[in-house]
Image: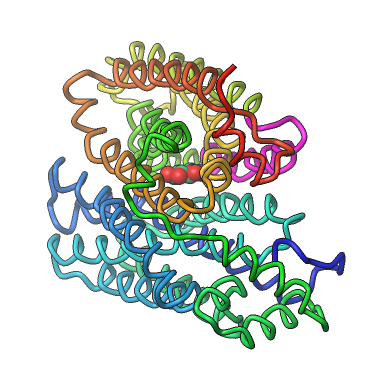
Amino acid sequence: MQRGETQRGITKWMLLVGAVISVAGILFGYDQGVISGALLGIGKDFHVGTTATEIITSWVTLGALVGALVAGVMADKIGRRPTLLFAGSLFSIGALIEALAPGTEVLVVGRLVVGFAVGVASVAAPLYAAEMAPSRLRGMFVSGYQLGITFGIFLAYLVDELMSASDWRLMLGVSAVVGVALVILVLPLPDSPRWYLKVGRRNDARDAIAKVAGDPDPDATIAELEADVAGETQASWGVAFSKRWRTPLIVGVGLAVFQQITGINAIIYYADKIFDAAGFSTVASQTAATTWAIGAVNVLATLIAVFFVDRLGRKPLLIAGLIGMTISLTAVGFAFQELGDISHAPSSQGPSDAGAITLVALVVYIASFAMSMGPIVWTIINEIYPREVRGRMVSIATAVNWFSAWLVSQFFLTLVKQLGESETFWLFAALCVAALAFVWRKVPETKDRTLEEIEQMWNAPKA
Ligand code: BGC
């Protein structure tokens, strides 16, 4: 439905596709965010130490890594729609396992199941949306995904704030509803016409176009899509890693890694703990700071990217965002030098100056990330790959992103213990500078280019 599309308005079916991608984002985000508030209660009930806390927090990403790797193949074999139905159902099952876990081990199993489902959805949903969306709306659909992620994180924080830490089972359990919502939304939709054609189901492809695009005469679209699908050879893993596609591989994987090692999920996951260390002495003040300063700002600043990514371009936003992230992380590092002894003093009168600086700096950090590295990394990963290797490379870049997220969340508390708070934040700041250099030198501007032009760009001899 990307080429021969008509100029018809948005049908209710397209809105439904938009809802599917957003709910898939919420699934991803809710799960990332909810653990931050649930950890306190889990810690009390199960008496977990640092390592177990890190495992409970971060193994969701390990599950997601595996999920992302199998999702591409699965979506090709059984279709995008069944893959999404599978992800939604599995997610709900995982959420129930978490909620009912009698001890740490079962809880970790639940985290892995939920993570696997999120990983599958994180590849299948954008793929489905990209194939269902008319090309003039494709950018909006991808941004809808990141907006869903940030909204999910915000929702999770809100749930954390409204419930007390001892309700952690309910906090984790309610996410089953989101999985069910995904299933309900996907059920009435057809699979993507492109997938139907790939497996030789021409009539179904016709029906899907007639239904979703509201096109009573879908034959022109079908003809173009067929030509497209016929020219689409499925390259092997060897081709995906060949010298020919080395540059886009490095750009996508590099961005996927930098999105994570510049610290975003250390902040998302451990926000309450950071505010605790920054002198927010009551649990209520910590969760309020997390919900509004991190969660709400994350959603709002994502809108900046949605609005400007096609006007200003990807690179200017990435560069501006990374500069903001570097400065704010450096400031948090300095604030924590002050906080060293303050956090040990009985702090009954709320956050100190250094605590307030931490709060402001983290707001700047989140806003800078949300207008740049958050949405734009996903946009670039989904647009820079040549057709013949797109599926595999998107899977690889997504899996690498999850692996990097796992590394950071797994070792953040250990890093803080070994290096100290200030030094850990400065390390993230230094990695932002490295990311800046990478974006500056390696990442091409893709604004206003068609996917075909981007493909040709990799083949052009270097000037
Ligand atoms: C990242 C997530 C992160 C989220 C924060 C996404 O783009 O991939 O790892 O938690 O942004 O909003």
Closer to us: 149 or 226: 226
Q: Looking at the picture, tell me which residue is in the foreground, 252 or 61.
A: 252
- The quadrant of the rendering that contains the N terminus is bottom right
Membership of 302 in magenta stretch: yes
Most common SS among magenta residues? helix
Q: Is residue 16 magenta?
A: no
**In the rendered image of this protein, does residue 130 appear above or below residue 373?**
below
Q: Quadrant of residue 9?
A: bottom right
The residue at the point 52 percent across, 23 percent down is: 439
- 377 left or right of 141 in image: left
Decide if residue 125 is on the left or right side of residue 338: right
Q: Is residue 376 above or below residue 4?
A: above
Position of residue 329 in the picture relative to residue 197 (left or right): left
Q: Position of residue 104 (x, y in %)?
A: 14, 60
Q: Position of residue 361 (x, y in %)?
A: 51, 22
Q: Could you tell me which residue is drawn at 59 percent across and 61 percent down? A: 22
**Residue at 54% across, 32% down:** 369
**Which range of residues does the magenta coloring cover?**
291-314
